[in-house]
Amino acid sequence: MTSPSTPSSPSTPSTPSPASAGEEILRLASADNFRDVAGPGYPTADGGRVRRGVFYRSNALRLTEADHGTVNGLGLRAVLDLRSRAEIDHHPDVEVPGAPWQNFDVSGIPMDKVAELRDRATAVALMDDVYRGFVEDERVRGEFGGLFRQLATGGPQLFHCTAGKDRTGWVAALLLHVAGVDDATIEADYLLSNELSAGSRAAIEAEIAQHAGPEHVAAFEPTLVVDAEYLRSGYDALEARYGDRATYLREGLGLDETTVATLRDLLREPE
């Protein structure tokens, strides 16, 4: 893990939450896909609300000093990194005092296959395969299971991958499902990554244009965004193998009923 970088810009000012007056949404300038898993306090299907300040999600923690100070102020108990060893070695996280770093290595987008992309259709098919792998790959399921068991030890905790959109988005979608949030809201929250990470995505697209040529940007673009199709590909694989998300959590990820119930209690505002 590394020290925070010199700030190039201050943290993005917080903006009022549309769901609750007086509440604010915390944003970071140097980790643009950082956010509370609960969003503004999403409603649940049974009239409850998701509790904020328990679980946070993000892209890689390459933080300015200002943002590092903000993260330090969250009182995190753990930082959970979903990246591969190669990704971690390339861009190690900054250390967050009081929050032990743990690695749950989940396969992301295979860079060797990305380098061979020449058209959008192949890129979309690759992303569909990534999400199916969250269900079909036994090793990946084991890593996700370990992550959820760690989250069940209590918040506040932060989990992330490189872009904070696919591996992180899958975990966040499952957590919101456990909390009782409806699928339309879960999908809308998942798709927020496209809006929030527009700045970092533009920087990557500029690098692709510079090194591979502008004509390749369109071919790579599906790997830089989230799409409802990707999430549904994961759900389809889940339903084909396990029938529903509850069985996937129990049999696929090896979570017992106590762990799932604990997560649900952590995620929901007290009644």
Image (tube, grey):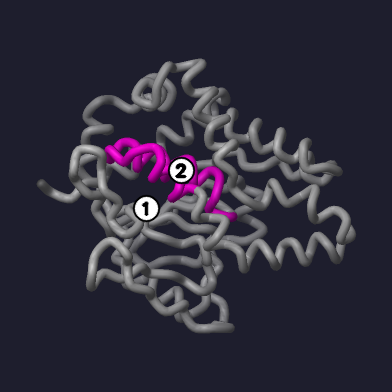
Classify 10 Å Cα crowding around label 2: few (below 14), some (14-19), many (20 and above).
Answer: some
- Above or below residue 248? Residue 123 is below
Give the prevailing secondary structure in the magenta stretch.
helix
Queried whether the magenta region covers residue 182, the answer comes back as yes
The amino acid type, in three-letter code, at marker 2 is Glu
Question: Looking at the image, which is closer to me, 172 or 149?
Answer: 172
Q: Which mark is residue 175?
A: none
Which residue sits at x=54%, y=50%? 165
Residue under label 1: 37
- Above or below residue 107? Residue 196 is below
Which residue sits at x=26%, y=33%? 259
Residue under label 2: 187
Gap between marks 2 and 1 measured at Cα: 13 Å
Relative horizontal placement of residue 29, taking residue 214 as reference (left or right): left
Q: Nearer the viewer, mark 2 or mark 1?
A: 2
Pinpoint residue 233: horizontal percent, then vertical percent: 57, 30
Of the numbered discs 2 and 1, the one sitting upstream in the chain is: 1
Relative horizontal placement of residue 201, taking residue 67 as reference (left or right): right
Queried whether the magenta region covers residue 36, the answer comes back as no
- Above or below residue 215? Residue 229 is above
The residue range painted magenta reads 163-190
Pinpoint residue 24: horizontal percent, then vertical percent: 31, 71
Pinpoint residue 134: horizontal percent, then vertical percent: 54, 31
Classify 10 Å Cα crowding around label 1: few (below 14), some (14-19), many (20 and above).
Answer: many
The amino acid type, in three-letter code, at marker 1 is Val
Relative horizontal placement of residue 98, taking residue 189 as reference (left or right): left
| Element type where label 2 sits in the image | helix
Which quadrant holds residue 91?
A: bottom right
- Total labels: the figure holds 2
